[in-house]
Amino acid sequence: MQKERRETIRALLTERAFVSLEELSEMFPDVSEMTLRRDIEFFESQQMAIKVRGGCRSLGFMGAVSELGVDVRSSLNAEAKKRIGETAAGYLETGRAIFIDSGTTMKAFASFVPSKRYSFITTDPSIALELCRSGMSVVNIVGGKLEGDNRTVTGLQATRFLSDINIDVAFLTPSGYSEESGFTVANYNECELKRIVAEKARTVIMLMDSSKCDKSLPYTFCTMADTDVLITENASEGLVKAASREGVNLVVAQ
C-alpha cells in the first residue's frame, strides 16, 4: 500500500506546484494524517518537495535547490552537512589564511570550528558571526553586494578584494557537480568569486553532500582537477573514480 500511495504522490509532485494535505486525505481516506505527513517528509528527504503549512511544494516547480532561500536549504540533508562539517574541521590549521565559503554546508562546518587562533576570510555575514563566537579567531568579511536569498557577499568589490589577498586554504561548496561540468553554481557573480578563490588558494577543500552529485548548473567555478580534498557523506562509484583519476583525496564523513 505504501509503495502505491507514494507513487501516486510522486506523480502529483511532477504535475503540480503544490499538493495539499487535505486533498491527500481525500485521496487516501483510510490513511491517517500522521502517515501522510511522513510521506511528505519522505519526498522532502528525496529533494522532490518542501514541506510547508497545509501540505508541500514541488521542487520541480521551484527551480534548482540552489535557487531556494537559505532558510529552506538549511533543512535539506541537515545530518549529512553536519557530518561533513565536523570532518572538515579536522583540516583547519592555525597560522594560515583560511577562506570559508558561504552556504548551509559551511554554516554547519563553522559550528565545529575549535576555539583556536585562526585567521578567516568569508563572504557570509552569518558564518562570520559564528566564527567569532570564541573571540580567539581573526575574522575578515569580504565587502560588496549582499545577495538577499543566499546571504552572501558578491560583486566587483568582492572580487577585487579577493584578488588582492593571499589564501592558503579554501573551503568551498558547490550547488552541483557532474563529471562533464565540474563544480557548478546557478549565480554568475557567485561563480566568479569562487573561481578567483579556487585559483588563488594553495589548497582547495571541497565540501559537498551527495545530493549535489550528477547535477549541472549554468556556471562552472572549478573542476575536480583543481581540487585537493573532497569531503562528502556518501560517494558513488563514479565520484570515487573521478577523484582517484585526478589525484584528489576523497574523504567520506562518518
Image (cartoon, rainbow, N blue to C red):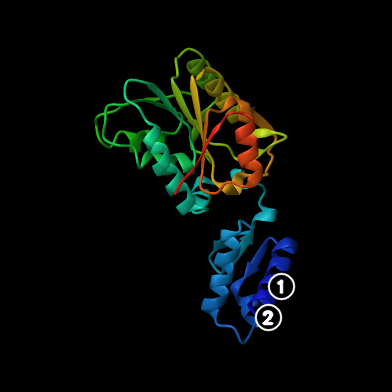
Q: In the displayed orientation, state which residue is furthest to the bottom.
A: 30
Residue assigned mark 1: 8
Q: Is residue 185 something that shows in the picture?
A: no
Residue 45 position within the rendered picture, expressed as x and y whole percent measured from the top left: 56, 59
Amino acid type assigned to the residue bearing label 1 in the image: Thr
Image: 87 above or below 17: above
Amino acid type assigned to the residue bearing label 2 in the image: Met
Which of labels 1 and 2 is toward the front?
1
Q: Is residue 194 something that shows in the picture?
A: yes
Residue assigned mark 2: 27
Q: Residues within 10 Å of mark 1 (few under 14, many from 20)?
A: few
Residue shown at 73% from the left, 35% from the top:
180
Q: Quadrant of residue 176?
A: top right
Marks 1 and 2 in Cβ contact (< 8 Å): yes
Residue shown at 75% from the left, 63% from the top:
15
Residue 61 position within the rendered picture, expressed as x and y whole percent measured from the top left: 69, 54
Q: Is residue 214 left or right of residue 96?
A: right
Q: Quadrant of the N terminus?
A: bottom right
Q: Nearer the viewer, residue 80 or 37?
A: 80
Q: Nearer the viewer, residue 235 or 74?
A: 235
Q: Quadrant of residue 43?
A: bottom right
Q: What secondary structure is marked by label 1?
A: helix
